[in-house]
Amino acid sequence: MLEQISTPLLFVGILVLYFLVLVWIGRRTSAQGDNTTFFTGNRSSPWYLVAYGMIGASLSGVTFLSIPGDVLFSGFSYMQLVAGYIAGYLVIAFVLLPVYYKLNLTTIYGYLEQRFGRNAYKTGAFYFLLSRSIGSAFRLFLVALVLQTFISDPLGFPFEATVLVTIILIWVYSFKGGIKTIVYTDTLQTTFMLLSLGISLVYLWQQIQLLEPNSSVWQQVGEMGMDYWLVWEPSAKNHFLKHFFGGMFITITMTGLDQDMMQKNLTCKSLKESQKNVLWMSSLLVPVNFLFLLLGSLLYVYGSKVGFLQIETLAEGKKIWMQNAGIISSDKVFAVIAAYELPVFAALLFFVGLVAAAYSTADSGLTALTTTFCVDFLGFKEGKGTVKQRYWVHFAFSMLLFVMIIVFKKLNNEAVIKELFTIAGYTYGPLLGMFTFGLLHKHKTRDMWIPIVCVLSPLFTFVLHHYSEILFNGYVFGFELLLVNGFITYLGLWVLSWRRNKSQF
């Protein structure tokens, strides 16, 4: 049992020490704590710190758990998606960043106002707020469940207290310095995440070699059917082309068109340094993602060798059985092996790595939500707004995340919660369509109708997704669904611009 390998107070001590360091960094980097510092970091961040820290921000707590867990079902085919990521980062570096720096934007949605008008601008900012709120709450919810298992349940604290303390801690170290603080805390959090990953890999590799000295570790991975990289089955969700182009447009949209991710890039001193940051960060993501996949394969090999996990292949797919606990989801494999099978130091490393990965995403998301609301809806960029008002906005979004996490817990249905997270992904499609049309065409369009197009596009995409097998002879959408969503928005804007231009003759 968990209590047999460690005590909850040990995890509490590690967590408190970790956050004390974050608070210290927050105080050192907040300077005067004015709005310029909070929103743009005074555009003075070293590019190499931003690049390194963004690795942790790109790999959230969900990624920390789900990528290793999915290896049993998808092998190393996730690297097809990573290849698409690289193509997407090239577009960000050489297409989007030059536009953002040329316009000297505080939030990237200011581009939509200059290109289309106020309605498009507000629609884009609203969709970001909606997407990031749901996404951040969902990621924190999953991590809060782990914190509940390691700390709160043994100490008798309710889930609500775990979540509230977690969010308050994030608010304390980020409310003053904002993005300038986040750039530096991300470097610390990325370091802990990579340490957790690296030491866990070394430990598992050594243990597997001790258990099977006459067989190579990679051979044992292959024996469990997890050593494939490319998928060419046309109907498969992880077909190479689906993954590659899906990864490319996921990166363009969920990084290049996402204020959370781009706010860090816009803190660099110049366009050239920001581009250097993106190129280095994207190249580092390749080996890091591979190591996470390797970790997953080692977890399954080790768990099977010691009899802790049993893998059964049934008609409906593979099932994971945990000793004395029955079927578990793949997302829980890393957590349960760390908690019940690995030594204390390995459990501590998992705990710190997960916390680092989760909060690297959560704190920057909270800062981006505050920035977008203050600048795009309260008009801070026009000289309005005080530091005190920004504090209150930051606090309000903190409480919003708290409420959303509690709602997720009350739903108590994993399928429903994941569906909500999927719905947040639909809202990035209109952003992709608007930015693509704006960059590729110079046509004017009817700004007043753009919000309607951006509401109908996700709805049409949702219908296509759920009836694709009927409508398209068994075809199942994968990550390319985002591209479909963006194309529908693009098509709607083209129709609006054609009607407008036609009426001018």
Image (cartoon, helix red, strand yellow):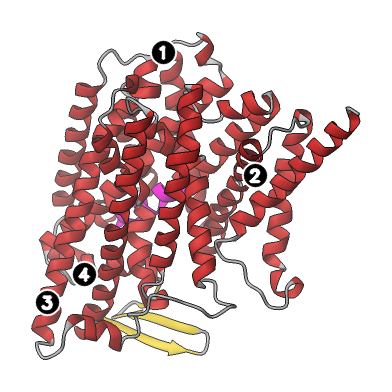
Residue plotted at (86% across, 36% down)? 499
Q: Amino acid at mark 2?
A: Gly
Q: Does residue 421 appear to the left or right of 170 in the view shown?
A: right
Q: Does residue 497 appear to the left or right of 293 in the view shown?
A: right
Residue identified by numbered label 2: 433
- Counting from the top left corner in percent of width and height, residue 173 is at 28, 29
Is disc 2 in contact with disc 1, using a CB cutoff of under 8 Å?
A: no
Residue identified by numbered label 3: 207
Q: Hey, which residue is sitting farthest front in the picture?
A: 505
Residue identified by numbered label 1: 388
Which label number is shown at residue 340?
4
| Vertical order, 160 against 383 (above or below) | below
| Front position among marks 1 and 3 | 3
Residue plotted at (16% across, 72% down)? 204
Q: Number of marks in the image? A: 4
Q: Please identify the quarter of the rendering in which residue 182 is found.
A: top left
